[in-house]
Image (cartoon, rainbow, N blue to C red):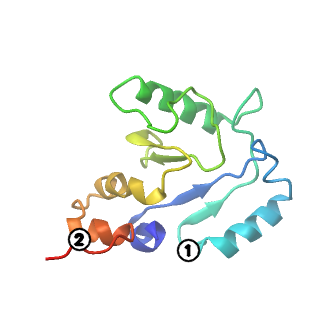
Amino acid sequence: MLLDRYAALGFRLLAFPSNQFGNQEPGSDDCARGYFREHVPAAGLGATMFDTVDVNGPGATDLFTLLKKSSAEQAKGAWRSPWNPVDSVVTWNYHKWVVDSSGKLVDGGFLTSPQSPVEAEPIIRKLLGLAPLGAEEAAEAVGEPEPEA
């Protein structure tokens, strides 16, 4: 959904599978990519699936070490996730980070597993220089019924 709306404007989805969460990615990288292509409708239109990586522990990739550090620094400020206060450890597969084109974590851009990627839409729109969604557009974006007049 977000890719459909914003890929033409430069929005990209980067997916990094990890087998550190309940052995959910035990297959090969080709197997994970096949699943991704099948289940992410816009795969290929701004979505890239990388090889399986470690996101925690001594083998964590530099990218996730940096993202976790940035998330922890961000959490020291006013922003906190209601589901999982950042403790510099990725706790599940579906964490999401919104990063700008220079690689910097955007303020408020750390979303934990239960949060829908659509919750990042206001941040993404701001990064792309777009106006905020109106009430009707926002309700439509998350699939809520339109308010009655």
Residue 3 vs 84, above or below: the answer is below
Which residue is at a point 74% across and 28% down the rendered structure image? 57
Residue 134 visible in the current orientation: no
Q: How many marks?
A: 2
Label 1 sits on residue:
42
Q: In x, y percent, where is residue 103?
A: 48, 42
- Front residue of 124/114: it is 114
Picture quadrant of residue 13: bottom right
- Front residue of 139/75: it is 139
Q: Residues within 10 Å of mark 2 (few under 14, many from 20)?
A: few
What label does residue 102 carry, if any?
none
Which image quarter holds the C terminus? bottom left
| SS at badge 1 | loop
Picture quadrant of residue 69: top right
Disc 1 and disc 2 in contact, CB within 8 angstroms: no
Q: Amino acid at mark 2?
A: Glu
Label 2 sits on residue:
136
Residue 52 visible in the current orientation: yes
In primary-sequence order, the first of circles 1 and 2 is 1
Which residue is at a point 75% across and 53% down the rendered structure image? 51
Q: Amino acid at mark 1?
A: Ala
| SS at badge 2 | helix
Residues under labels 1 and 2: Cα distance? 24 Å
Q: In x, y percent, where is residue 104?
A: 44, 39
